[in-house]
Amino acid sequence: MKQNDGRIIWKNISDLKLILLINEFIEKHGIKSSRQYQKKLSENPNSAPGMWFIIQKYGSWENLLVSIGLENTGYGKWAKTSEKDLLRIVGAFIEVEKITSQRMYEQKSVGKDVPSLSTLKKRFGDVRPLFRKKTEEPSFTDFELMLELRNEIIRLNLQDDLSMTKFRKLVQSPRLPSVDTIMKRTNKNWEELMTEIGFDYRKIKIYKQRNNLSKIKKTK
């Protein structure tokens, strides 16, 4: 049944006829995702009901596929794939295709045997980390990290000062993460770190305080 303006009233079509029509449209255009369905529908208006109607009637795209009997094919397989395997498949695809953004993934994933962006969002929520450029960072053991910290302090000639503020400003080692990262990883504050790598931080701190106090007295 059509309205006066030529549009089809999909709700007036029987469930069986509707399912057959949608299934035929999906098979004819080789549709593998809801986004691809919308794209083909925009190219072929009134050939099948829109996504708004599908969501209203079936609850979701996935429920529609179950109704059609496509849940065990490539359409619904990603829901049954483990997160570990899903990340491996998507990671390899992103690397091979040199994908750097969500929009780029959407464009390149059309017609490919990889999950859609909407599927990834449903499984993982925030998908931004998948598209962040991975930087090669040295993998330190805690011992190597502490050793590099000690060596950098000596290179900067700060072993008789041990000022965290000065170290932040002067550190040059490309192998060391930030001071905050080091403290978070080791669960130690700066004083504990200095003690751990063999410096008597408390003794130096007391000496500096006395020296500063002596200077103040001299200026009075």
Image (spheres, rainbow, N blue to C red):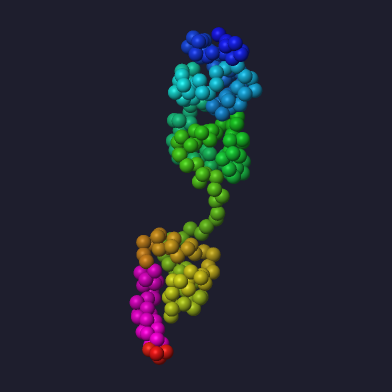
- The residue closer to the viewer here, 220 or 57, is 220
Q: What x and y, as percent, mark residue 76?
A: 48, 26
Residue 17, image x and y in percent?
Answer: 52, 10
Residue 117, image x, y percentages: 53, 35
Q: Give the residue displayed 51% in from the left and 75% down from the top.
A: 155
- Vertically, is 214 above or below 91? below
Residue 12's place in the image compared with 152, above or below, is above
Q: Position of residue 30 (x, y in %)?
A: 60, 22
For the point 40% across and 59% down, the residue is 185
Most common secondary structure along the magenta stretch: helix
Query: Is 194 within the magenta?
Result: yes
Q: Report if residue 43 lies within the magenta region.
A: no
Q: Which residues are magenta?
A: 190-216
* Depicted 25 relative to depicted 176: above or below: above
Outermost right residue: 43
Q: Toward the viewer: 10 or 166?
A: 10
| Left or right: 218 as drawn, with respect to 54 | left
> Image quarter for residue 9?
top right
Residue for point 51% across, 33% down: 118
Horizontal side of 63 relative to 105 (left or right) equals left
Q: Is residue 148 above or below residue 78?
A: below
Q: Residue at x 65, y 23 (%)?
A: 43
The quarter in which the N terminus is drawn is top right
Q: Quadrant of the C terminus?
A: bottom left
Q: Is residue 70 visible?
A: no
Q: Nearer the viewer, residue 153 or 59?
A: 59
User: Is residue 59 at all visible to an observer of this figure?
Assistant: yes
